[in-house]
Image (spheres, rainbow, N blue to C red):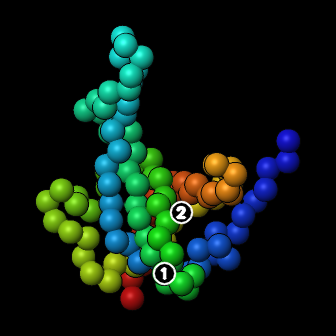
Amino acid sequence: MIKPIIDSVATFGETLLLVDVNTVYERVKNSEGNFEKTDKISHYSYTVVCLEKKFEKVTIKIDEPRALFNTEKSEVPENTYVEFENLVITPYVSNGWIQLSAKADKCVLVED
């Protein structure tokens, strides 16, 4: 199977404004077959605004041991620009529409 390689800069642009960081907890199947959230952190999801792409919002999954900001205690600081190490964008089809999922190794603050 041929897997497409998507250029992240051409897709999302170079300027990414961080707007939210969410903790995602692991889910396990219980005895009734339903999924329950556990206390174990699965990953973090970073929501960014792509300034060069008409302010589209994108959520990127990061498997880091610690989040860049703890949004349970405070908000993400204003004008926080970030970039992602080893960002991989993967297309998939949902309800007949092409969607994109994004995953990276690390989120890094961009210094002015």
Q: Secondary structure at mark 2?
A: strand
Q: Residue at the location (22% across, 60% down)?
A: 71
| Of pointers 1 and 2, the one earlier in the residue sequence | 1
Residue 56 higher or lower than 20, as above or below: below
The quarter of the rendered structure image containing the C terminus is bottom left
The quarter of the rendered structure image containing the N terminus is top right
In the picture of the structure, the residue carrying the numbered disc 1 is 55
In the displayed orientation, state which residue is furthest to the bottom. Answer: 112
Q: Amino acid at mark 1?
A: Phe
Q: For residue 84, which numbered disc appears in the image?
A: none
Q: Secondary structure at mark 1?
A: loop
Q: What is the spatial separation of the Cα atoms under label 1 and label 2, in whole angstroms? A: 21 Å
Residue closer to the observer: 37 or 76: 37
Whole-percent x, y for residue 12 in the image: 59, 74
Whole-percent x, y for residue 52 in the image: 55, 85
Q: Nearer the viewer, mark 1 or mark 2?
A: 1
Q: Amino acid at mark 2?
A: Glu
Whole-percent x, y for residue 46 in the image: 40, 61
Task: Indicate the quadrant where residue 10 lies.
Answer: bottom right
Q: For residue 85, which numbered disc appears in the image?
A: 2
